[in-house]
Image: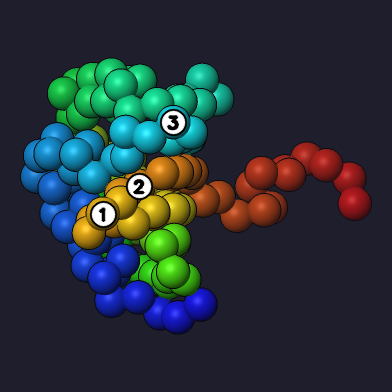
Amino acid sequence: MKPSKAIEAEVRRLETDFTNRDTSFFDRVSRQDGVLGIGSDPREWLSGHAKIIEVFGNQMKNMPPFEFSTHKVAAFEEGDVGWAAIDATWSFPSFPEMDPLSTRITLVFHREATEWKIVLFQTSFAFPDEDVFKGMAA
């Protein structure tokens, strides 16, 4: 495996499209069988291109204004498979009392013809372990 400037460039394009609410980033999701999108909500285990667009596209339309800032990107490839891990923050200016949300995103890409397409992504919110396990005895 090797670091991948091509995968990192894909991530940067996705970030720009997402921040601008440009749903054309869904064009970068593969239409092949087995495509999976996993969100932070327990109900967000979405199989297939159409379902991913239906659920996440609807969320984008209804989401309040936001800012999305990427802090770190790790991007690699091996043959026709690439992957990236993103450390980012979401903030919502219309809710100033709300702390920014630390977010982690993992993407798996597959080269289809000459393009990298997303075949798996997972998003989660990052919380300190002590907050997750608060109240448990050691």
Q: Mark yes or no: residue 101 visible.
A: no
Give residue 46's mark. none
Identify residue type, mark 3: Asp
Q: Secondary structure at mark 1?
A: loop
Question: Which residue is labeled 1 in the image?
Answer: 113
Q: How is the image coloured?
A: rainbow
Give coordinates of residue 100: x percent, y percent: 34, 49
- Judge left or right: residue 128 versus residue 5: right
Determine whether label 3 and label 1 are within 8 Å by CB.
no
Q: N-terminal of the two: label 2 or label 3?
A: 3
Residue displayed at 48% across by 33% down? 34
Position above or below: 32 against 80? above
Question: Which residue is labeled 2 in the image?
Answer: 118
Name the one closer to the observer, 101 or 106.
Answer: 106
Question: Which residue is labeled 3 in the image?
Answer: 33
Q: Secondary structure at mark 3?
A: loop
Is the residue marked by circle 3 packed among few (<14), some (14-19), or many (20+) residues within 10 Å?
A: few
CA gap between label 3 and label 1 equals 16 Å
Give coordinates of residue 7: x percent, y percent: 31, 66
Q: N-terminal of the two: label 3 or label 1?
A: 3
